Image (cartoon, helix red, strand yellow):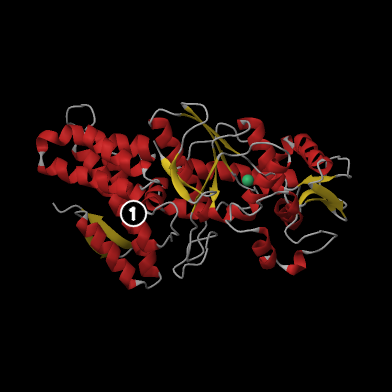
């Protein structure tokens, strides 16, 4: 059984579903106000892998991930582009779906939209006001963090410590404490709005997730997921509302680490040279990004550099080549020792680097012991595809496409006078068995005759 670090307790513990055989999971989805970035790629790839892995091990996973289609950033973007909020939201949602497809991320079983849940959010806010956990202030309704015992548990900090760290300027519009957060925001003229007992307005982001997760998954659902940057305050605030309303919220929490630059600073927007996620996917297939993500432990910070992408491309090619070499071997059952080792690594707080090492070990064994090769090849194929969401391509066409991509990258490196990189790509092509020449129109590769 998969064990994961529980953010609330700080302990790695097996993930026991409330209903045996079923797992109810919620992952905070996108605010559809802009182009998806590397942080989105990582969070979705990590938890898509977990979803696939658990399904493979026999669990029925109910996976819910929302779409925030009303929020300040969307309103700002619509004003900037001189268009409607609906237009911005639907365009960026379409781009989001396309990008997730390119990453090979399975669509959620339910993808609720915030705008379809406003009535239910209004009733939760009303309930919180009635219970004394929320109050009206100048520009909306706020949640009082003092009303919940143990506020700060996800950040593993107490209220006093959190309060001393909160920015003083946040104390505006009659908020009683700087940590109090908005549940209902009154609309300014021209802003989209819905009716409520406190005046026309829109729900706060933190209210959205708590309402939709409980509605679709039920009280005490198994697992709430997200990036570490959401653990506080977003997830704490979801939890606080549920507790204050007397509901049992997520039984477990798990968070993945951030994408950082070489200095270790959070960098989700783009790769070093300013490339967005869709642009990166024009150059590297989704499997390469998934491989890169799985090469790191899910809780460790990780960076996305050209070198790392090249290395991931090369490692994935070794697995693809193995699938190609073994494609005509008799189809037999997967080697259970390898599958068992692979699962043990995955079950140990999602040790994907260790799980990949098991698979490379199997590739080496298959070459050393040809009589075991059919069962080992079956194990590698099955673990990659079903356990990691990384189907192997035992086809030479993928190699052709990859060679074409490397040629294009080498030409652009030469155009920008990055000779070191051009040489590195030449070396890689040579290693793949090509002769590399500089022709009048750029790099020319051919197989030695
Ligand atoms: Zn959320």
Q: Is residue 254 left or right of residue 386?
A: right
The outermost residue toward the front is 149
In-front residue for pair 243/126: 243
Quadrant in the picture for residue 426? bottom left
Image position of 419 with respect to 304: above or below? below
Q: Which residue matches tag 1?
A: 312
Image position of 280 with respect to 44: above or below? below
Q: Is residue 144 left or right of residue 419?
A: right
Q: Is residue 254 visible?
A: yes
Residue 282 point in image, percent of width and height: 45, 51
Q: Identify the residue at horizontal 19%, vertical 52% (top origin).
A: 447
Q: Is residue 186 visible?
A: no
Image position of 378 with respect to 300: above or below? above
Q: Secondary structure at mark 1?
A: helix
Residue 415 point in image, percent of width and height: 39, 69
Residue 142 point in image, percent of width and height: 79, 51
Q: Identify the residue at horizontal 17%, vertical 32% (top origin).
A: 374
Q: Is residue 217 left or right of residue 74?
A: left
């Amino acid at each position: 059984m998969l064990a994961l670090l529980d953010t609330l307790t700080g302990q790695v513990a097996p993930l026991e579903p409330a209903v045996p055989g079923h797992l109810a999971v919620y992952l905070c989805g996108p605010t559809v106000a802009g182009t998806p970035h590397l942080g989105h790629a990582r969070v979705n790839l990590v938890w898509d892998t977990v979803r696939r892995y658990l399904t493979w091990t026999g669990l029925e996973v109910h996976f819910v991930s929302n779409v925030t289609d009303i929020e300040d950033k969307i309103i700002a973007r619509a004003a900037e582009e001189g268009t409607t909020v609906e237009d911005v939201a639907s365009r960026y949602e379409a781009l989001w779906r396309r990008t997730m497809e390119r990453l090979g991320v399975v669509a959620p079983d339910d993808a609720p939209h915030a705008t379809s849940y406003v009535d239910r959010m209004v009733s939760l806010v009303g309930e919180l006001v009635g219970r004394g956990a929320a109050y009206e202030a100048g520009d909306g309704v706020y949640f009082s963090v003092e009303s919940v015992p143990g506020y700060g548990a996800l950040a593993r900090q107490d209220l006093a410590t959190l309060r001393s760290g909160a920015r003083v300027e946040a104390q505006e519009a009659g908020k009683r404490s700087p940590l109090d957060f908005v549940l209902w925001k009154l609309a300014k003229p021209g802003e989209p709005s819905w009716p409520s007992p406190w005046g026309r307005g829109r729900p706060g982001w933190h209210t959205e997730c708590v309402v939709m997760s409980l509605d679709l998954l039920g009280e005490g659902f198994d697992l709430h997921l997200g990036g570490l940057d959401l653990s506080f305050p977003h997830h704490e605030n979801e939890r606080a509302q549920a507790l204050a309303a007397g509901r049992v919220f997520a039984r477990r929490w798990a968070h993945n680490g951030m994408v950082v630059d070489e200095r270790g600073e959070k960098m989700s927007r783009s790769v070093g040279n300013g490339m967005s996620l869709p642009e990166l996917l024009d150059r590297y297939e989704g499997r390469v990004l998934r491989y890169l993500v799985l090469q790191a432990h899910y809780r460790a910070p990780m960076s996305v550099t050209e070198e790392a992408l090249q290395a991931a491309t090369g490692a994935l090619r070794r697995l693809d080549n193995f699938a190609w070499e073994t494609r005509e071997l008799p189809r037999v059952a997967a080697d259970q020792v390898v599958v068992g080792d692979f699962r043990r690594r995955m079950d140990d707080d999602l040790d994907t680097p260790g799980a990949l090492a098991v698979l490379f070990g199997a590739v080496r064994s298959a070459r050393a012991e040809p009589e075991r090769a059919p069962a080992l090849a079956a194990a590698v194929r099955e673990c990659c595809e079903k356990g990691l969401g990384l189907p192997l391509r035992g086809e030479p066409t993928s190699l052709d496409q990859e060679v074409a991509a490397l040629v294009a990258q080498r030409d652009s490196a030469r155009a920008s006078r990055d000779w070191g990189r051009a040489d590195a790509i030449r070396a890689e092509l040579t290693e793949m068995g090509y002769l590399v020449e500089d022709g009048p129109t750029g790099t020319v590769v051919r197989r030695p005759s």
